[in-house]
Amino acid sequence: DQKTHKNKDLRKTGPVPDKPKPAVVSAPKAQAVKKPPVFGLQGKKWLVEYQENNKEVVISDAHSSHTVYVYSCKNSTIQVKGKINSMVVDNCKKTAVVLDGAIGTVEFINCQSVQCQVNEKVPTVSIDKTDGCQVFFPSGIGSTEIVTAKSSEMNIMLPKDGEQ
């Protein structure tokens, strides 16, 4: 015996039909606009942006007061000659960075398949929201701290004992 609603008027009517839903018209997504590559010193900040398939990006006159910001590069190699203050690598794919050293932090944020070689010393390497990161320390890691968050596939490469 099924229970019915106490209101007799409701029992007499059948199921309520669905209202026709308005069709959702989505605007066609705009094609990703390819932005022009940026490379240059603005104040004390080196900007390296939108480089694609460029293996010859070299910052040759970096100073300890300079910061380097690498953004949205793909299949590129950035080489920094000289000790810098800090470096941020943001939203890059298959990008390699070679630097002599840094006074502050070297950060990787929102990257995929990136590599970094630190030839001298850096106090901190920070890897956030990055999938696939290799950090090479050819002269040893020293007292470098490595901080990670929400990342996967990270490797730290050190020389074997006795190698330099």
Image: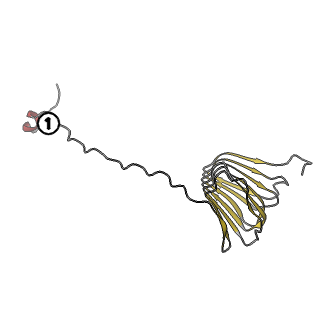
Residue placed furthest toward the top: 1
Residue 16 falls in which quadrant of the image? top left
Name the residue beneath numbered marker 1: 5
The kind of secondary structure element at disc 1 is loop
- Within 10 Å of disc 1 (Cα), the crowding (few <14, some 14-19, many 20+) is few
Q: Quadrant of the N terminus?
A: top left
Residue pictured at 17% horizontal, 27% vertical = 2
Q: How many marks?
A: 1
Image location (x, y in percent) of residue 22: 25, 45
Residue 124 falls in which quadrant of the image? bottom right
- Identity of the amino acid at label 1? His
Residue placed furthest toward the right: 162
Residue 95 relative to residue 18: left or right: right
Colour convention of the picture: secondary structure
Q: Nearer the viewer, residue 94 or 126?
A: 94
Q: Nearer the viewer, residue 147 or 92?
A: 92
Determine if residue 117 is in view. Answer: yes
Residue pictured at 73% horizontal, 73% vertical = 65
Residue 7 falls in which quadrant of the image? top left
Residue pictured at 51% horizontal, 55% vertical = 33
Determine if residue 46 is in view. Answer: no
Q: In the rendered image of this protein, does residue 5 appear above or below residue 114?
A: above
Residue 97 relative to residue 131: left or right: right
Image location (x, y in percent) of residue 133: 69, 48
Image location (x, y in percent) of residue 116: 73, 53
Image location (x, y in percent) of residue 20: 21, 41
